[in-house]
Image (spheres, rainbow, N blue to C red):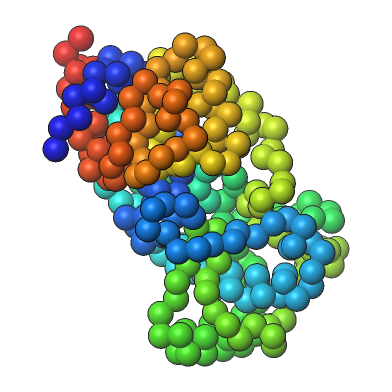
Amino acid sequence: MEAPELVAVLRSRRIAVLTGAGISTDSGIPDYRGPDSPPSNPMTIRQFTSDPVFRQRYWARNHLGWRHMAATLPNAGHRALAALEAAGVVSGLITQNVDLLHTKAGSGNVVDLHGTYARVVCLDCGHTMSRAALADLLESANPGFAERAAERVGGIAVAPDADAVVGDTGSFRVVDCPGCGGMLKPDIVYFGENVPKEHVAEAYSMVDNADALLVAGSSLTVYSGYRFVRHAAAAGIPIAIINRGRTRGDELATVKIDNGCSPMLALLADELPAVATSV
């Protein structure tokens, strides 16, 4: 497989990378908006905070889904980006994903723009805890729930936000903050929430300090990621996009490759370090 135009745009440049759900599909995590994705209605912050039944259903499903996500392994695309960072080609990585697969693959300079599935925060007092610690509390409050649900469905389908598809959630007991009794929420930016300002500032700085921006596996439908493409374009920074299907940033791209992330990023991991060491 060859993509000479992609290599030409990125050659001899320090690259900032922006990734979306499309990079994780080869790890078994479905995309929200890819051409082959099932219909999906991601949770909004208003639903989570205002509807106790909705919140109960969410935590029941997440109680199953987070375990699957924690066990998920990086794919060739994640490993390629980690290798490019180790080679000095990728200077930093901004991800819209909450799956921590870039960190698992060995990428070090990562901005988790939308948070991660692995931490929980209290909306009242700000107390934080690991998702594993909450799992112990939820298991104590709902003994055997995970095993019974897995037996009923046979297999568990998990969305990009660690939400598993399971029907019977009416008996599930939600656990409140052990510190103040307030409402616990995954440390994930839901639809309708703002991305933390410090994450946005760090990501802008990452783009400003790079010579090119590579987008991998994002339709850029959500403004939280698209803003960095607009920022790069306004600064005259070359933009390369790898994504199956159209993206909101196609007209701003220097080059657009309609292909899967894993093969194209593996290609870059083979081509770009060799170029970097020869100049």
How many dots with numbers? Answer: 0
Q: Position of residue 28 (x, y in %)?
A: 36, 61
Figure check: 91 above or below 55: above
Q: Quadrant of the N terminus?
A: top left
Q: Position of residue 77 (x, y in %)?
A: 30, 44
Could you tell whether 158 is left or right of 240 in the image?
Answer: right
Location of residue 37 (image quadrant):
bottom left
In this rendering, position of residue 167 left or right of residue 250: right
- The answer to whether one can see residue 46 in this image is yes
Across and down, in percent, residue 234 comes to 54, 14
Front-lying residue, 231 or 244:
244
Using the rendered image of the protein, determine whether residue 104 is visible from the camera's viewpoint: no
For the point 69% across and 87% down, the residue is 171
The residue at 63%/76% (across/down) is 60
* Position of 27 relative to 278 (above/below): below
* Left or right placement of residue 236 versus residue 178 in this view: left
Is residue 233 rendered to the left or right of residue 277? right
45 up-or-down from 222: above or below = below
The structure residue drawn at horizontal position 58% and vertical position 41%, both measured from the top left corner, is 222
> Foreground residue, 251 or 188?
251
